[in-house]
Image: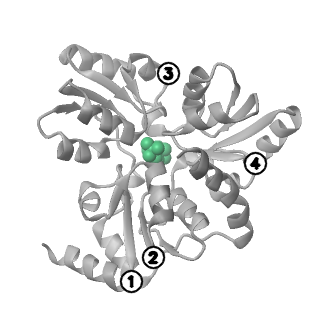
Amino acid sequence: MNDLIKEINELRKEKDAVILAHYYVDGAIQEIADYVGDSFYLAQKAREDPRRTIVFCGVTFMGESASVLNPDKTVLIPADDAVCPMALMADRDEIKKVREEYDDLAVVCYINSMAETKTLCDVCVTSSNAVKIVKGLPQKNIYFIPDQNLARFVAEQCPEKNVIPGYGFCHVHHYMEPADVEQMKKDHPGAQVLAHPECNAGIIALADYIGSTKGIINHAVESDCDEFIICTESGVEHELRTRAPEKKFYFAANQICPNMKKLTLEKVRDCLKNGQPVAEVTEEVRKAAMIPLERMLELGK
Ligand code: 13P
Ligand code: SF4
């Protein structure tokens, strides 16, 4: 074991800390994490784990949500500049405007959003539970923010609802080129295409399976097929290769989230040592953002 990992392990014990890592962060961090998963799984673990300190290795909205859900715990975010651009793409005035237009409306907020936005919403969702939660809502009209691609996917899966999409997008998934996937399909005709619902419509049209990062990984591991074209951030390759070393996975060249890659083992060590950066939310925001997040944990089970 190298010195840096030894130091992290000692600090983790001393500070009574649990380390959570999203599948998109560097493999070296995934290897030392207590839990690795998609957004929903990590939000659940942040709530369930009894340790007093949470080190959230992901983008800042993830740490913020963990902080909202755990007022009595300290949530450390090793890279406080790892901001998901999509999380900033919801317009608070627009939410108020749409609320005035419809009586029978639920504002559904993808967890990839800042806590202040969540305060104006009825329920949060992640990519793994969005369809289930929207289907179960009593309202017919669903204002789905901020991701236009996940909104389109939910609309297709829930034809009984009137889904009004936001205008946000994830630059990693939105700008994937269908032509690149078509070329990979030609090169590997037996491969299945597995796509995240944040992908653009052209990629989704080529997909054999659509799901969250955890869904994609589980599908690839459990499927009889042994070759896959993976349409999501390339950090999932670490878990795919660990759980299915005999299978083949193909990625396009540009599937990298630069913000998730800001997390390093050194920053994990430093935040444990210094007790910062901390995910900060005001008491007022915490109280209001807690409602849609708790609803998600309840309805998404
Ligand atoms: P999931 O973790 O829900 O698959 O979402 C992917 C994502 O883009 C996180 O930023
Ligand atoms: Fe945000 Fe996209 Fe990066 Fe996820 S992959 S954190 S949605 S920019």
Going 33% across and 78% down the picture, which residue do you hit? 12
Question: Which badge, 2 or 1, is on the more N-terminal residue?
Answer: 1
Where, by quadrant of the figure, is residue 231 drawn? top left
Amino acid type, label 4: Arg
Q: Does the residue at mark 2 contact the one at mark 1 (Cβ under 8 Å)?
A: yes
Residue at (35% x, 71% y) in the render: 267
Q: Residue under circle 2? A: 53
**Residue type for callout 3:** Ala
Pointer 3: residues within 10 angstroms few (<14), some, or many (20+)? some
Q: How crowded is mark 4: few (under 14 residues within 10 Å), some or many (20 or more)?
A: some
Q: What element carries label 4?
A: helix
Assess disc 1: are there few (<14), some (14-19) or many (≥20) residues with their C-alpha within 10 Å of its C-alpha: some
Image quadrant where residue 286 sits: bottom right
Q: Which image quadrant is residue 51 in?
A: bottom left
Q: Are marks 4 and 2 in contact (CB under 8 Å)?
A: no
Q: Mark 1 points at which residue?
A: 15
Q: Which residue is denoted by mark 3 in the rendering?
A: 201
Q: In this view, does 51 lie to the left or right of 250?
A: right
Name the colouring of the figure: one colour
Q: Mark 4 points at which residue?
A: 92
